[in-house]
Every structure is written in structure tokens, then in C-alpha cells.
Image: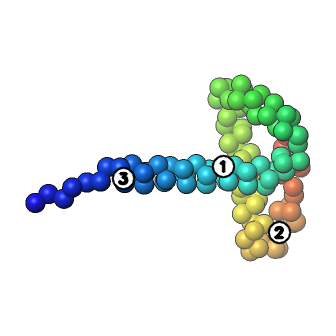
């Protein structure tokens, strides 16, 4: 005999999972804002900057330059938190604001 599926329970479980994923995404975005130092900006300034970036995001050259800068940011943070490269020239201690902002 075939097992009866509880569609309501499955739908509720999917909804719970979706809410958990959204909460995790929001938390990660908040952590990213703090890690870059953007939390020091006023909400209006940060919002305006993000809107400006979104407006320019259609240009492929901009996106590639931003992708490169972002990858470099995460590599620096990885080395800093990894504590395995203490013999480098001290550049891993740079703040994100001292990177290329152009």
C-alpha cells in the first residue's frame, strides 16, 4: 500500500528552510558590511553608494574590476585569519579602506 504524503507538513518544512536561508543570507550580508568597514557609514550614504553601484553594474568592465577587488579582499582576510603567513611584509594587516578605491 502506498504511503500517504503530508503535503502540509512538507510545505511547512520548506517554508521553514526558506526562512532559515534568508536569515543566514541577511546575517552574512551584515557580516560583510562590518568586515569591509562600511558599517561606519550612515545608512543613507551606504544606501546611496549601493544604488550607485547597481546603476553602474551593467558595465562589464566595472563588474570585473569589482570582482577582482572583492577576491583580493577575501584573500587578504583569509591570510589574516589563517595566521599562517606571519612572515610576509605586513600587508595583510591593511584595512579594506586602504585598498584601491577608484
Depth check, front residue: 23 or 11 = 11
User: Which corner quadrant holds the N terminus?
Assistant: bottom left
Residue 94, quarter of picture: bottom right
Depth check: give the residue in front, 39 or 74. 39
The numbered disc on residue 88 is 2
- CB atoms at circles 2 and 3 under 8 Å apart? no
Mark 1, Cα crowd under 10 Å, few <14 / some 14-19 / many 20+, is few
Residue of label 3:
10
Residue drawn at x 82%, y 68% is 88
Q: Circle 1 — which element? A: helix
Q: Residues within 10 Å of mark 3 (few under 14, many from 20)?
A: few
Query: How many numbered tags mark residues here?
Result: 3
Instruction: State the separation of the CA atoms marked 3 and 1.
Output: 24 Å
Dot 2 surroundings within 10 Å: few (below 14), some, or many (20 or more)?
few
Which quadrant of the figure has residue 58?
top right
Quadrant showing the C terminus: top right
Image location of residue 6, percent across then percent down: 29, 54
Q: Determine the CA span between mark 2 and mark 3.
A: 52 Å
Between discs 3 and 1, the one toward the N terminus = 3
Q: Position of residue 52 (x, y in %)?
A: 77, 28
Query: Mark 1 and mark 3 in contact (Cβ < 8 Å)?
Result: no
Residue at the location (87% across, 66% down)? Answer: 89
Q: Is residue 100 above or below residue 53?
A: below
Q: Which residue is mark 1?
A: 26
Q: Tag 3, which secondary structure? A: helix
Amino acid at each position: 500500500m502506498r504511503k500517504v504524503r503530508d503535503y502540509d507538513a512538507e510545505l511547512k518544512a520548506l517554508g521553514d528552510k526558506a526562512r532559515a536561508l534568508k536569515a543566514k543570507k541577511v546575517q552574512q550580508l551584515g557580516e560583510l558590511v562590518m568586515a569591509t568597514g562600511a558599517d561606519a557609514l550612515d545608512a543613507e550614504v551606504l544606501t546611496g553608494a549601493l544604488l550607485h553601484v547597481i546603476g553602474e553594474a551593467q558595465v562589464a568592465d566595472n563588474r570585473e574590476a569589482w570582482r577582482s577587488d572583492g577576491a583580493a579582499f577575501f584573500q587578504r582576510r583569509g591570510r589574516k585569519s589563517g595566521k599562517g603567513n606571519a612572515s610576509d611584509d605586513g600587508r595583510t594587516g591593511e584595512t579594506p579602506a586602504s585598498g584601491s578605491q577608484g
